[in-house]
Amino acid sequence: KKYIYMEINLERETILNLLISSSKAYSNDTSSSEKIIESNDPLLDVQVKVIATDNIPIIAFRGSDSMTDALVDIQTLTQNLSEYFSFISLKDDLLAHSGFLKSVANVYDKLKNELDDVDTYDLTGHSYGSGMQTIFQYVYFIDTGKKPRRSVAFGSPRVFAGNISNFNNKMDLLRVQNFNDMITYIPSKSVNTTTATSMLVGGALGAYGSKSSLGGTLGSIAGGITSYSINA
């Protein structure tokens, strides 16, 4: 099956490749084409893997993998992006999950440096990682005017609140979620959160990864991508 997205056809293989990249973000091992970006704050455990492929880097944000991450996950009060990024104007400002926002701010300059000479890039992440991915995508666009070629988030909660048209009118984001994964449905749409486009998948076990923290298992997402429906 194909899903028309960002004016291109995203086939199952493409989505699975990004899923595999999001799984690689959990590993501390690196190949010659990979680089790890980490936080410098002992109260944060942020890990982002930059994967060079076909001259287009994939920026993969790791999901929850420690008790430190779990403590970040529960920091659900919202803060304005402008509290961490001075270039965010009043008209572009959004409320975001404070834990995810703090994590992005901690590694933002390092990631920006990695992309300085890059015009095209892909974004992916899983669970907590996909929350960071969503915030980074928007903030980096406001800062530089650069959009990702593809941005596919796996098992992601909704991370923005407030005037979400700021995000929805500017960004393309595909959220891939297990249909029975409660994390991907919160906060509720009734509180005016960013929804993007959701691809609901079945919960059958798959072959790629076995991380089972918030956001569902990567394996079950992989197994379900053959069957999905759209639920924006």
Image (cartoon, grey):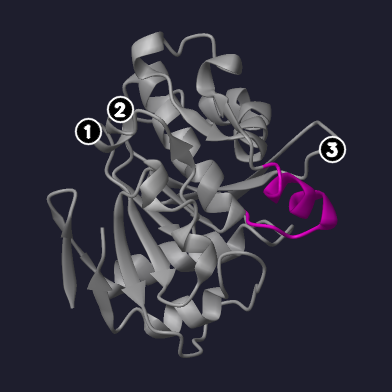
Q: Is residue 71 magenta?
A: yes
Distance CA(mark 1)–CA(mark 3)? 34 Å
Camera-side residue of 53 and 174: 174
Q: Which residue is mark 3?
A: 43
Q: Of 126 and 161, which appears nearest the observer? A: 161
Q: Earlier in the sequence, mark 1 or mark 3?
A: 3
Q: Label 1: few (<14), some or many (≥20) within 10 Å?
A: few
* Displayed quadrant of residue 50: top right
Residue beneath label 1, please? 169
| Residue type for callout 3 | Leu
* Local secondary structure at mark 2: helix
Give, as a single range, the part of the protein colored magenta. Answer: 62-75
Answer few, some or many: residues within 10 Å of disc 2's Cα (few below 14, many 20 plus, some between 14 and 19): some
Q: Amino acid at mark 2?
A: Asn
Disc number at residue 166? Answer: 2
Disc 1 to disc 2: CB gap under 8 Å: yes
Q: Is residue 82 left or right of residue 195?
A: right
Q: Is residue 33 visible?
A: no
| Residue 96 placement (x, y as % from top left) | 52, 34
Which of the two labelled residues, at mark 2 and mark 3, occupies the earlier sequence position? 3
